[in-house]
């Protein structure tokens, strides 16, 4: 689905469809009342009732068009991680800043990968192993002073050094930015990759006392949990 099709379907679902259904039902009801009321309005009543039925019928025809159905399916995967404006009857409304801030740190790969306006690129970043214990791996990343307490998926591979593996999502068409879509700031965390030859060791007390979760620091990565 391209940008123009998305905008058309979105405006139909949020504006034209409710207006058509409400307007059609009002015309139909008013037409019936006029028809059964003896007077000059009676001839117009049947016309208004038919017009109301046609309006409702056309609305449902457009509702079940493939492009509209595809939009509604894809829209179910849109979260504040991908979009910071919500469609309304009259246009668009900004999403709560607190909500977008929370979603910026959420992995949410199951939804992101379903959105047709994004391309997905594999990314990695080396980390410095600082021990592991009780299902948690500890490491340092970038120039961040605090160690990371990681409890997500771990993959053992024939590699020289441990690293984080994930994806970065970018919009295929920047026109989507005009209706609130964004390029997510943080990379989606998929797994910690460790060497098969890694010599495991317990973390030091200093690491245990100062370790923080991946999403609590400005690491450029989301949470590791789904």
Image: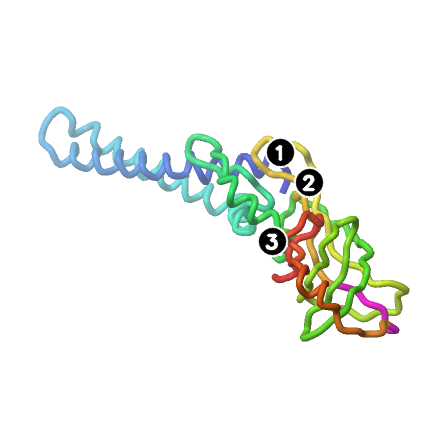
* Disc 3: which residue: 106
* 4 relative to 188, above or below: above
Secondary structure character of the magenta stretch overall = strand
Quarter occupied by the C terminus = bottom right
Of all residues shown, which one is farthest toward the right? 160
**Residue 188 in the image: x percent, y percent?**
69, 53
Residue lying farthest top? 40
**Quarter where residue 159 is shown:** bottom right
Q: Compute the Cα span from label 2 to label 1.
A: 8 Å
- Element under disc 2: strand
Q: Name the residue under label 1.
A: 177
Within 10 Å of disc 1 (Cα), the crowding (few <14, some 14-19, many 20+) is some
Query: Disc 3 and disc 1: Cα gap in Å?
Result: 20 Å
Q: In this view, does 202 lie above or below 74?
A: below
Residue that carries the numbered disc 2 in the rendered image: 171
63 in the magenta segment: no
**On-image quarter of the N terminus:** top right
Q: Position of residue 214 (x, y in %)?
A: 67, 56
Please indicate whether residue 126 sits to the left or right of residue 81 in the image: right
Labelled pair 2, 1 in contact (Cβ < 8 Å)? yes
């Amino acid at each position: 689905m391209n940008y123009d099709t998305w905008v058309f379907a979105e405006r139909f679902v949020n504006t034209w469809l409710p207006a058509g259904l409400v307007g059609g039902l009002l015309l139909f009801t008013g037409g019936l009342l006029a028809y059964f009321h003896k007077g000059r309005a009676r001839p117009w009543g049947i016309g208004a009732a038919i017009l109301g039925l046609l309006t409702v019928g056309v609305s449902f025809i457009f509702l079940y068009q493939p492009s509209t159905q595809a939009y509604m399916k894809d829209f179910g995967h849109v979260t504040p991680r991908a979009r910071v404006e919500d469609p309304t009857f009259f246009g668009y409304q900004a999403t709560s800043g607190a909500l977008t801030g929370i979603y910026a740190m959420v992995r949410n790969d199951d939804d992101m990968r379903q959105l047709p306006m994004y391309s997905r690129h594999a990314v990695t970043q080396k980390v410095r192993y600082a021990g592991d214990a009780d299902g948690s791996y500890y490491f340092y990343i970038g120039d961040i002073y605090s160690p990371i307490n990681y409890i997500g998926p771990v993959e053992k591979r024939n590699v020289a050094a441990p690293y984080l593996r994930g994806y970065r999502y970018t919009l295929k068409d920047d026109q989507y930015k005009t209706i609130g879509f964004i390029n997510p700031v943080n990379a989606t965390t998929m797994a910690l990759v460790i060497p098969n030859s890694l010599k495991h060791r317990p973390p030091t007390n200093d690491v245990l006392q100062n370790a923080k979760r991946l999403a609590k620091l400005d690491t450029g990565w989301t949470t590791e949990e789904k």
